[in-house]
Amino acid sequence: MAIKIGFSTSVCPDWDIHAIVEHANEMGFYGVELGTVRDEMHLPAAEDLQSDKDIDAVRKLFEDNSVELVSLVSIYAFDAKEPHIRRRSFERTVENIELAEKLGCRLVRLPLGAPVGREPVEQCLARQVPHLSELARIASRKKVTLLATNSPGFPSSRAVWFEVDGVSHPGLRAAWNPVLGMSCGEASTVAVPRLGARIRQIQAADASFNPDGRFVAYQPIGSGAINYDKTIDLLKGLLFDGYLMLDWPQVRAENIPGPQEALPAALNHLLERIKLVEPELTAYKKDKNAPNYAAAKPAFVQRQVAKAAVAEGGDDAAEAGEADAGGGDVKPRVAKGGDPKIAALVAEAVRKVRAARAARGG
């Protein structure tokens, strides 16, 4: 199964690292995304990740429970106009990349921020490209990949594509949040083909929207407006081998039960579609003019074979004449390049003709 399922710590803000890893193992999840640890959003400052010894302990905890530490969440965007703010975000992001390297984590997910004031969208996105380009090179050297993710300020996949295509470096790829996409009227059936093979992670959540398309509330997976059946089918077509990462802010998800109930339910719902094997489609159609001997009645086949044998003459006709004149069983004779089934039918027809003549003569 190429598509894997994990969950982000946003769905279980009250769990510590030990509880996160143990529950992931017990519930059957493949991986976890670390977003906050004990309410600390800047992970390098988290109490459990201060020293190399602590980091090694966390890494071993994941390995011992056969759970992958898939990604870290960085809260820093590069949308500010002030250079010193962007530089501070840059430095904090580098700290996250270095922590990911120490933890053996392959991905660091970044938000795109929001336009400042009424500035054009492209202007804000273009301002972020140089920083993301430099960070992509740093991450690549440390065997880490950055994921540009749509945000409330940039909910469309166009913004994600703008950054990934503008940087054009293997150190930067895409993650997609379908709830944020639906908030601007963009379904995953548009976003997934647009981002294509550059998608590395899906932030899986579900929500309801009013008739005007405005977000109303988070819902359990499968009961909202997000069509995960089509999303998963599209991902299969892309040979996607990343994660569907369950990710919703539990503190704002009043309609979703606690993580111990909501996570297994979401896992089972998504697994059912992932494991579904669709029948293979083909454009081939049978030749409508081809003879269908199996569907024809035996008497009809025998008559047609007998007529063909008499009309063709040759060896088969001679064999039929010999069979009429003499006794014994008639053995099928297959001409070079002939069909053994036709030869068998000819022999059967000859036997019946001989038997009928013998009955009339008697």
Image (cartoon, helix red, strand yellow):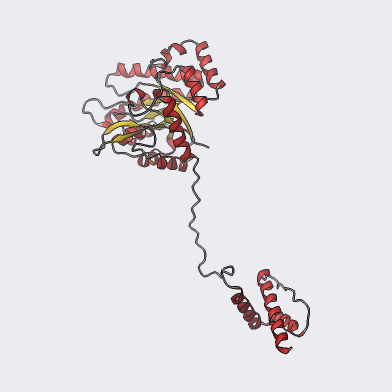
The residue nearer to you, when weighing 116 against 128, is 116
Instruction: Answer left or right for 10 relative to 338.
Output: left
338 relative position to 5: left or right: right
Question: How many numbered discs, if any?
Answer: 0
Q: Residue at x 47, y 41 (%)?
A: 236
Residue 322, horizontal then vertical, whole percent: 75, 83
**In the displayed structure, would residue 265 be above or below residue 20?**
below
Q: Which quadrant of the figure has residue 247?
A: top left
Q: Which residue ends up furthest to the left in the rendered image? A: 118
* Residue 171 appears anywhere in the view: no
Determine which quarter of the picture holds residue 192. top left
- State the image coordinates of residue 359 (x, y, percent, origin top left): 71, 85
Residue depicted at x 44% and y 28%: 263
Estimate the x, y position of residue 347 in percent, counting from the top left.
70, 75
Is residue 135 shown to the viewer in this render?
yes
Give the image location of residue 260, x and y in percent: 44, 25
